[in-house]
Image (tube, helix red, strand yellow):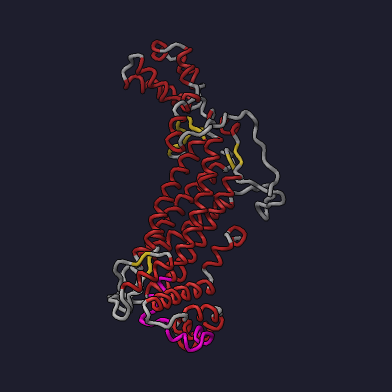
Amino acid sequence: MIERYTLPRMGALWTQQRKYESWLQVELAACEAMEEVKKVPKGTAAHVRRKVTIDPDRIDEIEKVTKHDVIAFLEAVAEQAGPKARHLHAGLTSSDVLDTGLALQMVEAGGIILEDLDALLAVLKKRAVEHQETVMVGRSHGIHGEPISLGVKFALWFEEFKRHRKRFVAAGEDIAVGKLSGAMGTFAHLPPRIESMVCKKLGLKAAPVSNQVVQRDRHAAYLTALALIAASIEKVATEIRHLQRTEVLEAEEFFSVGQKGSSAMPHKRNPVGSENLCGLARVIRSNSLAAMENVALWHERDISHSSVERIIIPDSNILMDYMLVRLTKLLTNLVVYPDRMLKNLNLTGGLVYSQRLLLALIDRGAERKSAYEAVQRNAMEAWQGNGNFQDLVTNDPFISRKLSASEIHTCFNPQAYLKNLPQVFRRVFGNVATAKKSSAKPTRKKGRA
């Protein structure tokens, strides 16, 4: 399932091939810098680049003997490059290559995820504008509250993912650092100038200070930013799952021709995409916790973080790419049922307008406690099925002395709850053209690619 949705370049980014290529990028940049300061013969890096083709199988074969991945990598490179390969890795330690190479991969992965976020934001904006005036009931505690519009939900999600984008950009900047400070971070064998030159060549910043590794709070911040995005993806997916419940059915995931919902019950149309996203959010959140536990290492470095990162960093980036692409497609094709929304809005016989009635009574001079009790008394009668709420309050002596039947009727107009939405939308989107509410009755779409 994941392969169908994940952008191919994200998956390719976390292969062994790409990892070793990033290591070679670092080694060649360091070699070029050493050439520039006349510590290595000119043309060495160009020779290695021309001669070497990364062969993960050969590196893995050597590693079975060396039990050390960077040494295996260097030996495999030397087999192809010949004697000039001796100038590679001079003054470096393994983590100089590992951490700087990882930064290259994470920066590229972050760029893909930003593209995914921008695609999602575009869809959220489009659907918010489309449904600015699509009236539905708002719920708190799962119980009917007051009328809202579906567009407000989309606008809320848009603003939330816009905040995520800002946080993710900051986390990406934090992770875009390299280090070539040597085994203990003291630049004992290479000067800081070489580190600065290499990082500039690679499009990274040099870590201002490091020990044997780039500090893992940077990686934890990146994975925490992913975990926050995943939490909001789950929030949206959970809402869709609720709206698709049979008793609610105000919106549902697109159900394509030939799709099956159950092996036993042919009628089923399940929110499988949303459920899938909710489950994967748990994985990314768990991975962020593991990243936080990687921050504390012994002294200048141990490798307790290394095995963890080989799992959590590729998996979290790949999963986030997949989740954002899938959510964007799900929301693009989300089927909306405005008529069902109106039906559910009227399900309680007008109880959702109780606050508007209460405020109207107070405006007409009623004491708040008395007004509240009068409205609640009639609301409870309506809850018990003893009449329509609007009819009950119209015939209530206390209420009818304060408000005319026409004034009471005005309190039961759902459009009054949407009057300030243009201002809200301007806050969120700036000046955008809004779609007029459609009177067309939505249908269950039968199939679309």
Side (left or right) of 251 relative to 225: right
Q: In this figure, what is the number of numbered marks? A: 0
Query: Which residue is located at x 67 percent, y 55 percent?
Result: 263
Residue at position x 59%, y 33% from top? 338
Q: Residue at x 35, y 18 (%)?
A: 362
Looking at the image, is 175 positioned above or below residue 29? above
In percent of width and height, residue 115 lies at 51, 53
Tell me where residue 368 sits by quadrant. Answer: top left
The prevailing secondary structure element of the residues shown in magenta is helix
Q: Is residue 6 left or right of residue 355?
A: right
Between 342 and 220, the residue placed more toward the observer is 220
Residue 226: percent from left, percent from top: 44, 57
Q: For the point 39% across and 12% down, which residue is it? A: 402
Rendered view: 306 above or below 283: below
Residue 377 spot, x, y in % from top left: 41, 23
Q: Which quadrant of the figure contains the N terminus?
A: bottom right
On screen, residue 116 above or below 383: below
Does residue 338 appear in this view?
A: yes
The answer to whether 345 appears left or right of 361 in the picture is: right
Q: Judge whether residue 387 is colored magenta.
A: no
Q: Does the magenta run of residues contain 98?
A: yes
Q: Residue furthest right?
A: 258
Boundaries of the magenta span: 76-100
Residue 95 location (% of width, % of height): 38, 76
In this view of the protein, which residue sits in the foreground, 394 or 438?
438
The reply to whether residue 135 is visible in this rendering is no
